[in-house]
Image (spheres, rainbow, N blue to C red):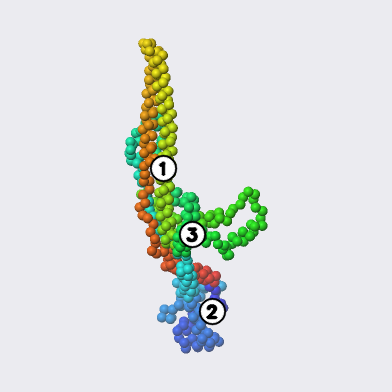
Amino acid sequence: MKLTPHEKKILNLIEKNPEIIDDTKKRAKVAKENELSEKTLRNRIGDLKKYGVISSENMNTLKGSNRNLKNDGSIKEDKLDPLVIINNNRTLIVKVSLITGIIGLIYALFATPYYQSTTSMYPALDTEKSGGILGGSIKGLAESYGLMGLGSAPTYNIPDIVLSRRIKKNIILSKWKSQAFPDSSNLIKFWEIDKPDRFSPYIILDLFRAFLPKAKGYSTSTDKIHLENAIEKLQRQIFVNEEQSGLIVVSVLMEDPFLSANITNYIAAYVKEFISLEQEKEAIKKKEFIFSQMQSAKIDLSDSEFKLTNFLKQNPLGLGNPDLQLQQGRLIREIEENQAVYITLRQQYEIAKIEAEEDKLFINILDEGDVAVRKSKPKRSLIVLSSISLGIMFSLLIVFYRERLYI
């Protein structure tokens, strides 16, 4: 901070007469000698104290002197105490902190409250992996004959299902009861996405686009736009966490606690039903495939039996012939091979029928979504404390930056 000539003059007077800091009579005498009023001299001494140029121990010792000034009369930077600067500007710091704290409190009071509901689920054990009915021996035997496609049903990643676009569309377009809509409504109406926002910047863009030539064969309906906006909003309010143990935790944030719980339980039921139906489709597909292979193997077995029968009819007395015996052995081996394939497929087909008919448990719901008793967002105390902290940091930046301008 640079001192004015008048302030440098006062500083010189203080160095020559340190007692004027607290001696009123001496200060009045010195002021008169230098054509100043006692009040003016007292005020200038107060200003220098405020700037941190001078301080006193028992009001006698000077902190600042000419040695603390640069050649141009400004205070040396290393003599500026940050604590002194903060103390001298404490009123500004308090005001800024109070303003930001009040802004944070107003936001916390008027911000839309959100309620969270949580459900947890985990995949059930695979019976085939755990050595279920007839285990994997028949499956291995079938695969040894080159019958592909008889593997286990595919597994599904639960987080991918929860975050899929398909389930979001179902959630948005379903009817939900809430405090705002006791007779139920979809989420587009609940969020009022279908209502025009007079303050939205997109209105200007829409008006501008109205004068632009439209692409041929392409048009987007308003309903599709509303659906896309709702999907983007819902995506920010569904959270999935996969624990190391395999437990899947799904949380939903909504403006209505009952709506949050209903959507959470809908997701759990949807995932369970989706996997069950998909596994059932795979089981039916597997059964149909095995049945077609079994029918083909049955035909091959009948053909090989028919060939052997005709051979024996044509050669009833020629079995002593080595060539005929070799041909007969080949026909018998062909029957045995076709019979083994048919028996394997018949066993696998019976297993597939049981799998297609039985009611398997693929997903276990550990915790259902409950109605929240308190809001999850916004956290008012945290918002207010954060706002005050930001205000303090912002005001300190202003104070120190302003002080540096005078250094």
Q: Which residue is mark 3?
A: 185
Residue 165 location (% of width, % of height): 49, 51
Residue 383 location (% of width, % of height): 44, 66
Q: What amino acid does circle 1 point to?
A: Glu
Q: Is residue 95 above or below residue 273?
A: below
Residue 145 location (% of width, % of height): 40, 29
> What label does residue 280 carry, if any?
1
Q: What amino acid does circle 2 point to?
A: Glu
Residues packed near mark 3 inside 10 Å, few (<14), some (14 to 19) or many (20 plus): some
Give how far apart the Cα atoms at labels 3 and 1 are. 32 Å
Residue nearest the viewer, comparing 309 with 90 = 309
The quarter of the picture where residue 348 lies is: top left
Tell me whether the residue at label 3 lies in contact with that at label 2, contact meaning CB atoms closer than 8 angstroms. Answer: no
Q: Secondary structure at mark 2?
A: helix
Q: Which residue is mark 2?
A: 7
Q: Secondary structure at mark 1?
A: helix
Q: Which is closer to the viewer, label 3 or label 2? A: 3
> Which residue appears at 45% of the width and 63% of the height?
182
Residue nearest the viewer, comparing 192 with 381 = 192
Asked if residue 327 shows in the view, the reply is no
> What label does residue 189 carry, if any?
none
Residue nearest the viewer, comparing 308 with 275 = 308
> Which residue appears at 34% of the width and 33% of the height?
137
Q: Is residue 384 above or below residue 4?
A: above
